[in-house]
Each structure stands twice: as C-alpha cells, then as structure tokens.
Amino acid sequence: EAKKKGKNTIEYYNDIAAFNSFKRMDMEKNLRAEAANSFNGFEVYYQPVMNVLGESPKCSGAEALVRWNVPDMGLVSPGEFIPLAEYLGLINPMGNYILEDACKACKSWNDKGHPEYSVNVNLSVVQLLQKNIVKIIDNTLKKTGLKPENLVLEVTESLAINDIKKMKQVLGQIRNLGVGIALDDFGTGYSSLSHIKELPLNEIKVDQCFIRDIGEDDYSCAFVKMVGELADALKVDVCVEGVEEKEQYEIIKLLNLKYIQGYYFGKPMRLYEFENQFL
Ligand code: C2E
Ligand code: MG
Ligand code: MG
Ligand code: MG
C-alpha cells in the first residue's frame, strides 16, 4: 500500500484512516487539484520570534506556517492537511513551495535593514528522507540569495527519532551547508534524551503544552527550566513556544531563556502584516 502511494510514504500515517471519509475525500480531491495548480491556494504566514534576553524584546525573525484556503471549506489548518499531503505523496512539492516562499521573504527582510533576521521552516520526516533534499535546500538558497545562516529547519522530535542514524546523516549534511537545525515540540512524542545529544542541533523548541500552565504547575515550570539548562550544556539556543500571557512571558524572563514565540508577541500573520509590524 505504502509503495503504491509513493516511495517516501511512511506507514504510520495510518491515523489518516480515522478521518471522516466524506470530508477526507473532499479534501483529497481539493489537495490534488491544488498540487496541479502549483499550490496557488496556499499562503505562508509568518509568526514573529522574539529574542527576550536583552532589556526589551527584539524580533529575530519568524517561523513560516502554511495556511490553505479551500473554496467552500475556508482556512484548513496544517495539522489536518500535512498528514494527508504526506499520505498522498504531495508533501515534497508542497514543501518546496513553502521553503522557497520563506527563503524569498527572509532574503527581502535581510535586504531591508534586518540582516540578522532568520526564518524557520518546518520539515516533515518524509521531506527529510527525499533523496535529494540537501540539493533542494542548497538550490533554494542559491535561487533566492538567502544566506544559509539565516535559515533554520525545524524537525519534530517524534519523527527525528524514527530512524536516528539516517536522520543524523541527513541533518549533518544540511548543517554542513551552514543551515541551522531546530528540534520542534520538545517534550512530546517519543522523546529520548540520549538521542538529543547525537543530533546536530542549533536550537530546541519547548512544546507549548508546558507553557500553558507554567504559572500554576510546578512540573511544567521545572521542565522548562531543565530544558534551558540542557540547552546551555549542549550550547544550543532555546525557544519557548505558545506564550500567550504577560505572566508566562515574565516567568520565561526569570528563567533567562533566549527566544519566545507566541500570541503574546504576535500570531502567525500574512507576509505584509509581518513586514508592517516588524520591519
Ligand atoms: P509547530 O511547528 O509547532 O508550529 C507552532 C504552532 O503553534 C502553529 O500552529 C502556531 O500557529 C501555533 N501557535 C503559535 N503561538 C501560539 C500561542 O501562543 N498559542 C497557541 N494556542 N498556539 C500557538 P499551526 O500553524 O496550526 O501549525 C501546526 C503544525 O503544523 C506546526 O506545528 C507544524 O508541525 C505543522 N506545519 C505548519 N506549517 C508547516 C509547513 O510549512 N510544513 C510542514 N511540514 N509542517 C508545517
Ligand atoms: Mg515548528
Ligand atoms: Mg512547535
Ligand atoms: Mg507543533
């Protein structure tokens, strides 16, 4: 079955079967049409990432988060269509489109007076296991003129651990281009601390579930603090995701963590809105 759908389709997207079938078939039809139409219905949104180490928070760039505007369905969230795109073998062309959009956007920020801004782009394991992924990234950098050090690729922990040896090798090659690697959603999924030290990481992103009740829950607070210490020991940056309240922001400040991303500083927004607010 997996073979029929494309070489890189991975079997554990079985939860796709749990999809309500009418909606799923509709989405599948729309997604195929979208792919045939060069992903014109897709729009990459940008969420600011703030460096909060200094006196006042400073934008350091953004994370690219894709949105899909489906006729008759409205805005569909990536949590729904990314697994489907993987299952259908459409994630690679879609991912290339997103990567190029993000690199182009960041290059223009760098040219417009913010040479330090970087852009984070999510890559699923299917994308990482493409034979020519390193070449694709390199070509996209050359085509858009973005400097490798201004690109960070985010991989999720559960996926990164799936085939640790292969993953280590691919991520190593990507790192050799000068591109950064961030471990996304840390603390969820199949976390294994022993793997963390083996992966060539530049950044750890703490999953937002730990921030939600950081003010009330001692465990969450201890966890975030521990990740900060781990990041220091590994000499990687740490980003705290999902910060919505001032109180949460203040706790992160006290813990001396470098980056924050969350609704408190800005939701994912359209490119022109990001540029209006942060350039
Ligand atoms: P992620 O990479 O962990 O992205 C962070 C998610 O948290 C985003 O959801 C973002 O909108 C949301 N978020 C950010 N700040 C807050 C906050 O303060 N409160 C709350 N409640 N949520 C916040 P989104 O955009 O729905 O994306 C969901 C996931 O879909 C992403 O998780 C990522 O794994 C995946 N994804 C998104 N865009 C892409 C893409 O271009 N390619 C791939 N392969 N995956 C993507
Ligand atoms: Mg991410
Ligand atoms: Mg995340
Ligand atoms: Mg996530």
Image (tube, rainbow, N blue to C red):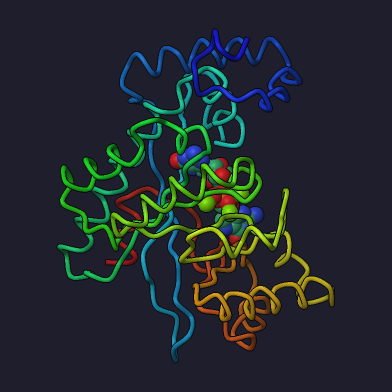
In the picture provided, is 20 more to the left or to the right than 151?
A: right
Looking at the image, which is closer to me, 228 or 138? Answer: 138
Expressed as whole percent of the image width and height from the top left, the position of residue 253 reads: 59, 85
Looking at the image, which is closer to me, 153 or 26? Answer: 153
Residue 181 location, quadrant: bottom left
Q: Is residue 72 visible?
A: yes
Expressed as whole percent of the image width and height from the top left, the position of residue 52 reads: 48, 81
Residue 212 location, quadrant: bottom right
At a point 42% along the width and 49% down the height, the residue shown is 121
- Above or below — where is 5 with respect to 278? above
At a point 49% along the width and 18% down the height, the residue shown is 7
At a point 45% along the width and 47% down the height, the residue shown is 169
Residue 86 location, quadrant: top right
In the picture provided, is 187 more to the left or to the right than 160?
A: right
Q: Is residue 66 visible?
A: no
Expressed as whole percent of the image width and height from the top left, the position of residue 177 reads: 28, 54
Looking at the image, which is closer to me, 153 or 177? Answer: 177
- Please identify the quadrant where the C terminus is shown: bottom left
Q: Residue furthest bottom?
A: 55
At a point 54% along the width and 68% down the height, the residue shown is 239
Expressed as whole percent of the image width and height from the top left, the position of residue 49 reads: 45, 66
State how many labels appear: 0
In the picture provided, is 266 more to the left or to the right than 222?
A: left
- Above or below — where is 5 with respect to 178? above
Looking at the image, which is closer to me, 233 or 66? Answer: 233
- Above or below — where is 121 with respect to 241? above
- Please identify the quadrant where the N terminus is shown: top right
